[in-house]
Every structure is written in structure tokens, then in C-alpha cells.
Image (spheres, rainbow, N blue to C red):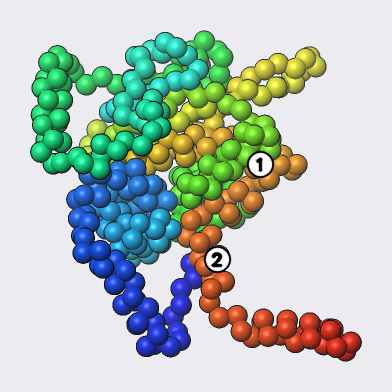
Amino acid sequence: MGYVAVKGGTQAIEASIDRLKYDRLKGNEIVEINTILATMRNLVDQVMSEASLYAPFLAALAIKQAGGSMEEAVFLMRAHRSTLPRSYYSETVEVEEMFVERRVSASFKDIPGGQLLGATNDYTHRLLDFSLVEETLEENKQWLSDYQKELEKIEASEVHYFPKVVDYLRAEGLFDTYPLDNTSPKDVTKESIQFPTGRSERLQVLTRGQTGAVTALGYASLRGYGQVHPTIGEVRVGDVPIHVKHPYEKNQDEEDNFYIGEIKVTEVESFVPVPVKKTNGNEELEFDIGYGISFGQNETKAIAMSILDQCLESPHGEFPTHDEEFVLLHIDSVEATGFISHLKLPHYVTFQSKLDSIRQVKKGGKVDAD
């Protein structure tokens, strides 16, 4: 749960809030919401992912209100989300219908449909670009105009849907094929998770998890706590369409579903080698698939999520990264931030009790067993 102060010195609290506003305004600069949306898309995507609310404008507003504090922005978005009505659930998103803007595979040099690098920092020099200090709006408009002219030279073609890499491996019999499980997932925002969890619950908690925490635990497993070292089969970034059924019609055909928009997501499928003992006693190498998906372009988190997905699908008592209670109960942004932050709130009574106990011990007295 998230902890907030609700009682205590009213005047002091109001003065603290005024000081917070003063710190935001004293620079005599205003960051427009549209500026955040246009220039801080990765931050906006991260807030939406951890808040589990796809609303770029509201995420940008939360970032501005929080003064750039990630945990506060997520807290604000989660709080706002809790006030919104849930009118209906969407139909299952078909990622095969993604309008792909970035698609890479670390498993193969050549993949069906080809690699598409898209927009990424992966191939940039990690050197500070001091030209950004002096950039002007006029220069940016000119660069955009030139870039648009270059794009216009490229012959337009019909929309192309990229095939999934794993489908070709399944066709070769290298990966198992499973029947579709159309069981409705449990909604972890509506009911508390109970252990042991189902995979739908684990994936929900992982995709809502704090980006740094998910990345850290994924790295821990990769480094040696379980030694899960996958090869990325495919990373996809793009827009997927969202459809819903008519709320008052039953037995509606799939083609009659309503298209209500699209959302940008990052999807990752990792191939994890695992030794499997066969009935003849021989040990053979097979592959598990770890899955990760996140709002926006959030590739590191989605990759780490795919590692942890495979870890939690293969429980191993020796390693905390394979323990679903350890992982799922410690990666939530609001839970973790709230519990740590509550230590700033008054603990006078409990601390004084401990001090009294220590004083009695120092004086050679007895401490009452409590």
C-alpha cells in the first residue's frame, strides 16, 4: 500500500506544500505538457507502464506535477486510475497485427521480413552532445523539413505485417506448440494476488513493476542467481489495435468488434536453453520462451521481464529470482516507495520504547519481556 500523511500540524503541512510550489516556480520557467510529450517520450512510456494506465497526456501532467520524480508521477497516475470507471475489457490484442516501427533479433542475422532498427539509442555514441545547448526551434524545423523530403523519396508501399520469428522455429519442430488457453485472466488491480499465482497474474505484476527493480532482478538472474541466459528471439516496438465488443450485444462475431484506437507496446520473446531429461535417460537441450511486454518503448524492462517470466515458470528454491513471492512482492513501484517513505512519518512511541529498553540495560536493570 502507499503511505501518505493525513493528520498533523496543519499550518506546517500547508507551509511545506507552499515551499514545494515555490521550488517549482522560482526558476521562472514553465515546462509545457506538450513539451514533455514531445521530448521525453521514454519517461512518459515508463510512467504509463508502471502506472498501468495508457494515457500519454496524463503521464506528462503527472511528470510535471511531480517535478520529474518517477515514483511520485506513478503514484499520481495510480491514484487517478483508481477513480476511473471500468466500462468493459478489450478483446485479446493480436500482436501479429502490430504496426511495427522497430524489430530486431539477436538470434538470427536474417529473419523473415528483415530486421528493422527503428529509433533507438543502441547505436549512438554515449557522448554528451553539447550542440543541444544551443539548438533553436528554427534549426529543428529545417532539419525536420529536410528529413521529410528524404522520406518522400522512399516509395510508399502497403502496410506490411511482420511474421513472428518463433512461428518459423515451431514449424521446424524446434519449439513445442501449445493449444490456445482462452481462460479469462485474473485482474490483479481488482483482486489481490494469492500464491501460488497463475501466469496471467505474474505477467501483469511484472509489466506494472518498477522498471529499475525488474531490470535489477533480471540482471541478478542473468549474472548467476539461477543463471538464466536467454537469446533474444525478437524485440518488437509498434502500435497494436484495440477492439472491444458491444457492451449490450451477446454472441457478437469477431468481425463486428469495435476498433477504439491503438497503443504502442514493446514485446519481447526470449529463447532460454534448458536441459531436459528424456524417457530414455538421455539429457537433451530444449528451449523455453520467456515473454515480456510493456507500454511504450521500454525495451530493457521488457527483456528483463522475459527473463523473470521464465524464472517464475521454473521455480527453484535455491534462487530468489525463481521465488514468485520474493519477486512479485518487491517490484511494485507504489508499494516499495510507500513502505520506504513511511519511515519518515512519526515513530515516536515505538522508538522511545526501544530507547527505554536500552537505557535499562545500560543501567543494569531488567527489561520486561513483552
- 107 horizontally vs 262: left or right: right
The answer to whether one can see residue 81 in this image is: no
The answer to whether the residues at label 2 and label 1 have Cβ atoms under 8 Å apart is no
Does residue 274 appear in this view?
yes
User: Which quadrant of the figure has residue 65?
Assistant: bottom left
The residue at 45%/12% (across/down) is 109
Give the answer, above or below, for where 97 lies relative to 32.
Answer: above
Which sits in the foreground, 182 or 80? 80
**Closer to the camera, 288 or 71?**
71
What amino acid is found at the position of numbered circle 1 in the picture? His
Is residue 137 toward the left or the right of residue 193 in the image?
left
Q: Where is residue 35? Give x, y as percent.
A: 21, 49
* Residue occupying image coordinates x 15% and y 25%: 147
Residue at the spot of label 2: 339
Q: In which quarter of the image is residue 138?
A: top left
Q: Name the residue under label 1.
A: 322
Q: Mark 2 or 1 closer to N-term?
A: 1
